Image: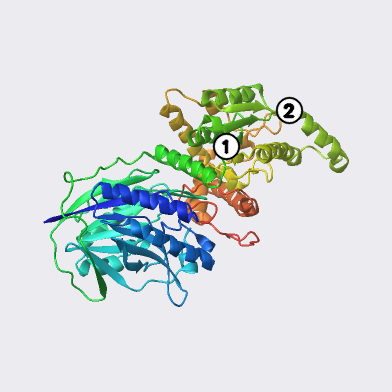
Amino acid sequence: MKNIRIALAQINTTVGDLNGNAEKIVSAIQKARAMSSDVVVFPELSITGYPPEDLLLKKHFIDDNLATLKTVTPHTKNITVVIGFVDRDSQKSLFNAAAVIANGKLKSVYRKNNLPNYGVFDEKRYFQKGEKVKIFSCDGISLGISICEDIWSDNGPCMLQAKAGAQILLNLSASPYHLGKMKQREKVLSACAKKLKATVCYCNLVGGQDELIFDGGSFFVDPKGKTFATGKQFEEDLIVADIAVSPKASKGKGVEKIRVEKNFKTKAGIFIKGRVHKHLKTEEEIYQALVLGTRDYLYKNGFKKAVIGISGGIDSALVAAIARDALGAKNVLGVSMPSPYTSSGTKKDAKRLAQNLGIEFMELSIKSIFAEYLKILKTIFGKTPSDVAEQNLQARIRGNILMAISNKHGHLVLTTGNKSETAVGYCTLYGDMAGGFAVIKDIPKTRVYKLVEFRNKKGKKAVIPQSIIKRAPTAELKKNQKDQDSLPAYDVLDAILAAYVEGDQAIGKFLKDKKARSLVKKTVDLVDHMEYKRRQAPLGIKISPKAFGKDRRLPITNKYREK
C-alpha cells in the first residue's frame, strides 16, 4: 500500500481578474506544499473565473488566460497541480480544460468531454467537446481527471478512466448552488465511487458571480461511497487527505497515460484523514448564500457601501440584516421615507431595526414631494379617482431618493422585493424595483419569515422587532392597505408559484376544484403578464432550482396561454 496526499483548493475566483486569480492559486499551492501534498486540485476555469461568458469571444482574453497559466507554472516545484483554464487549438477552437503541471513543467492538458447547455449553462456556445480521456500516474498510483459535468454521466470519461486502472478520480468543478444541491452532489458522486470502485476527489468553486453562488463544499468519497473529508460551505478552504491505494499497472484502450514523477520521498507528519463538516440546516444554508452573494457582488464590482430603503416591513428588515452581516454595520445606510400613509408603528420599527443592527439611519419624509407631484399632475389626472398611479408615484419618489444617494456617495442600492411579489408584478418599475442588486429576489415571502426567525435566533439578541414580524404585510401606499387586498394569502400564492414557475406544471395538474383553479388561473395570468417587469429588474441571488433570470428565459411578447 502507498499513500498519496491530495489537497482540494476551493478558492473564490473573480471572473476576468486573471492576476488576482493567479495570486490565489499560487498562495494555495504554497499552503498545499507546506502540508507535503503530492497533488493539489483547483476548481474549473480557475484562471479565468466561472462563468466567463462572452469574454471567451475576445481573442486577447484567451491569450491573457494562457499567459497567466504560464506564470503559475514556475510555482509547481515538488508538487503536481491540476488547474482549470481555457485551452485553444491550432484551429482557434476553445476548450474548457485542466492543465497538469509538475515541477515547473506542463505535463498534459485534459479537455472537458461533456458540455452542459441547460439551466444557467451555455458551454456549447463557447467550447468544443474534448475527445480524449486521460489518466496520469504518480509513483505508480493512477489518477483520472474530469471536469464538472463529466463525472455526472454514467458512461462518461470517468468510467473509461476507471476501466483503464485509475484508482483516484479528480474532478474540477464550478457547480452553482441552489437549495439541496450539496446533498444531490454527494449522492451522485457516492454512487459513482461505488460503481467505479475508485476514490473521488471533488473540488468545487466558492464565491458569488452576479446571480450565481458557488458554495464550495468540496469533498472526498471512498470506493465504498462514504464521504470521508469535506470542505466548508460558502468560504474558501483547503481540504487535505491521504488516500491509501495499492499501485497497479494501468490498462485499457482509448485512454492516454501520462507519467508524473513522484514529488516527495517521505511524508511529513501523520496520516491525514481530513474532517467531515455537518450539513447546514436549510435556513442557515440559504442565509449564508445570501450573505456571500451580497458581499461578493458589492466588493467584486468596486462598491464599499450599500443603501437600503427601510420601510418597517419584514422584507427590508431581512435585506438590512443580510447587508449588515455581509458588509459590516458601518457600510450600510438605512433610509426611512414616510409618506402620508405611513403609520407611526412602521416609522418606529424602521428606526428600531437600524439601532438593533447598528447601521447608519436617516428619515426623509416624502410628503411634501408627493404633494408637489400631485399638484403638477392635477391637470393630467383631472378628477379621476386615486388609484395605482398615485400609489406607484410614492414608490418612484423613494426610488429617486435612493438613487440620488447612490450617485452622490457611491453606495449601491439594494432592492427589497421578494420572489412572490416579483412573480406577480406586485412591485413598481423605477420605484421599489430601482436599484443595483436584488438580494431576496429568489426568496418566496413564506421563506422570508423563516429566514427572519433564523436570524433572530442566530445572535445574542433578536435584531428584527416582533412588531415587524407580526404586522400584516402592507405596502402602505393608501389608507388601510394590506397585501392580501390584491393577492392570495402568501402560503397559497407561494405553493402556486412553486408549481408553475419552478415546476413548469400545467394548471390542472396541481389544483383540481373549480374555486382553486380560478385562483390559480388568475395567478398564472399575472405571472405571464409581468415578464416585462422582471426583465427590467436588477439581478438577484439564485437560491431555488429555477430562479427568474438565466434559468427562466421566456419571451416578453408572448400570446401563449394554457387552455
Amino acid type, callout 1: Lys
Q: Which residue is mark 2?
A: 340
Determine the image quadrant of residue 406.
top right
Which residue sits at x=20%, y=45%?
A: 273
Tell me residue 296's x, y (percent).
49, 44
Q: Which residue is mark 1?
A: 305
Q: Judging from the image, what secondary structure is the residue with disc 2 in?
A: loop
Picture layout, residue 136 above or below residue 27:
below
Which residue sits at x=46%, y=77%?
A: 91
Tell me residue 85's x, y (percent).
41, 62
Mark 2 or mark 1: whose residue is earlier in sequence = 1
Picture layout, residue 467 above or below residue 153:
above
**Horizontal arrangement in the rendering, residue 167 relative to residue 484 (left or right):** left
Q: Quadrant of the N terminus?
A: bottom left
Q: Nearer the viewer, residue 469 or 278?
A: 278
Q: Residue furthest bottom?
A: 91
Picture layout, residue 193 above or below residue 398:
below
Confirm whether residue 283 shows in the render. yes
Do residues under tags 2 and 1 come within 8 Å of each other at their CB atoms? no
Mark 2 surroundings: few (<14), some (14-19) or many (≥20) residues within 10 A: some
Q: Kindly identify which numbered label has been placed on residue 360.
A: none
Mark 1 surroundings: few (<14), some (14-19) or many (≥20) residues within 10 A: many
Amino acid type, callout 2: Pro
Confirm whether residue 155 shows in the render. no
Picture layout, residue 461 above or below residue 43:
above
Q: Residue furthest left?
A: 1
Q: Nearer the viewer, residue 458 or 59?
A: 59
Tell me residue 416's x, y (percent).
58, 39
Tell me the distance, in whole angstroms, between the alpha carbons under discs 2 and 1: 30 Å
Q: Quadrant of the C terminus?
A: bottom right
Q: Residue furthest right?
A: 379
